[in-house]
């Protein structure tokens, strides 16, 4: 079955600390992977995507993610978190012959000053 | 800026009273999606349009209907809202190359409409 797992429901970090949000996927074909961020009361904003090529992808707001096929993972990282990064983060997967996304359940990030 | 706009941002309706939520886009994307998102949950796809072709998810209740009169606009109609339909409703768009060889493209989301049921 196709699915996305975000093992961490809630993460708390201090401002300036590094961040890694985990994402594991199960997909029967070549996955297209996405990370979205959702601030309270807002829609989802695309942070970055991986379709092919270099497995380390750069996104907006200083985020990056690394695709590891052997581990079926697509973890999101940021070297230094800012208070404005506090939000909900969703990992999603798609692929060929579908225009639909499968979302993970999200990770809520809290940032302390 | 090209964008996806949802109106209204907040909607209050009475139990059983029909309600319509609207979405417009200036991206000229051919695919439009409606999601339901409840608190602390992932968005749940209700249905989507590829151009005028309507694609309903198997578990979307019959209470939920949609219309897409043209490329720019899409509406979500809830015929008889129940308390369980209180949620954030998100509209999204994407540009797919062809219907026969669809490849998941990035989706662009509106800010949502928060629906409350009295």
Image (cartoon, grey):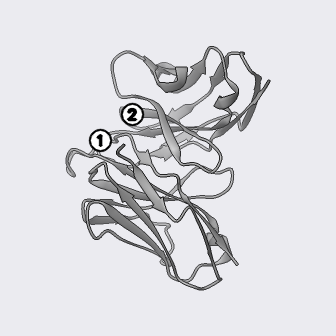
The answer to whether residue A1 is visible is no
- Mark linked to residue B72: none
Q: Are marks 2 and 1 on the same chain?
A: no
Quadrant location of the N terminus of chain B? top left
Q: Residue furthest right?
A: A113
Name the spot of residue B111 as percent of width and height, x first: 52, 52
> For the residues marked 2 and 1, what is the alpha-carbon distance in whole angstroms?
9 Å
What is the chain letter for disc 2?
A
Residue behind mark 1: B103
Residue at point 50% right, 82% down?
A: B79
Residue at point 41% right, 62% down?
A: B23
Kindly state the secondary structure of the residue where label 1 is placed.
loop
Asked if the residue under mark 1 is in contact with the one under mark 2, i.e. CB atoms within 8 Å, the reply is: yes
Is residue A75 shown above or below B80?
above
The answer to whether residue B63 is visible is yes
Name the spot of residue A32 as percent of width and height, x first: 39, 33
Q: Which of these two is toward me, B20 or B43?
A: B20
Q: Residue furthest front?
A: B1
Name the spot of residue B89 as percent of width and height, x first: 54, 61
Quadrant location of the C terminus of chain B? bottom right
Residue B99 horizontal side relative to residue B45, left or right = left
Residue B25 horizontal side relative to residue A40, left or right = left
Hey, which quadrant is residue B74 in on the image? bottom left
Kindly state the secondary structure of the residue where label 2 is placed.
strand
Residue behind mark 2: A32
Is residue A109 shown above or below A70?
below
Residue at point 65% right, 83% down?
A: B15
Name the spot of residue B59 as percent of width and height, x first: 50, 66
Q: Residues within 10 Å of mark 1 (few under 14, many from 20)?
A: some
Number of numbered labels in the structure image: 2
Q: Residue furthest bottom?
A: B16
């Amino acid at each position: 079955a196709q699915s996305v797992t975000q093992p961490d429901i809630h993460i708390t970090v201090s401002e300036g600390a590094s961040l890694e949000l985990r994402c594991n996927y199960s997909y029967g074909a070549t996955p297209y992977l996405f990370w979205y961020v959702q601030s309270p009361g807002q829609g989802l904003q695309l942070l970055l995507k991986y379709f092919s090529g270099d497995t380390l992808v750069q996104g907006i707001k200083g985020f990056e993610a690394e695709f590891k096929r052997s581990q079926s993972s697509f973890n999101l990282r940021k070297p230094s978190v800012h208070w404005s990064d506090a939000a909900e983060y969703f990992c999603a997967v798609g692929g060929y012959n579908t225009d639909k996304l499968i979302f993970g359940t999200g990770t809520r990030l809290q940032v302390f000053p | 800026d090209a964008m996806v706009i949802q109106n209204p941002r907040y909607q209050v309706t009475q139990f059983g009273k029909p309600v319509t939520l609207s979405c417009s886009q200036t991206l000229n994307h051919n695919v439009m999606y409606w999601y339901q998102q409840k608190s602390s949950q992932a968005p749940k796809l209700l249905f989507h349009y590829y151009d005028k072709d309507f694609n309903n998810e198997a578990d979307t209740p019959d209470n939920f209907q949609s219309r897409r009169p043209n490329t720019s606009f899409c509406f979500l109609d809830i015929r008889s809202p129940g308390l369980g339909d209180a949620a954030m409703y998100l509209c999204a768009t994407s540009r797919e190359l062809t219907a026969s060889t669809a490849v998941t493209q990035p989706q662009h989301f509106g800010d949502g409409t928060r629906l409350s049921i009295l």
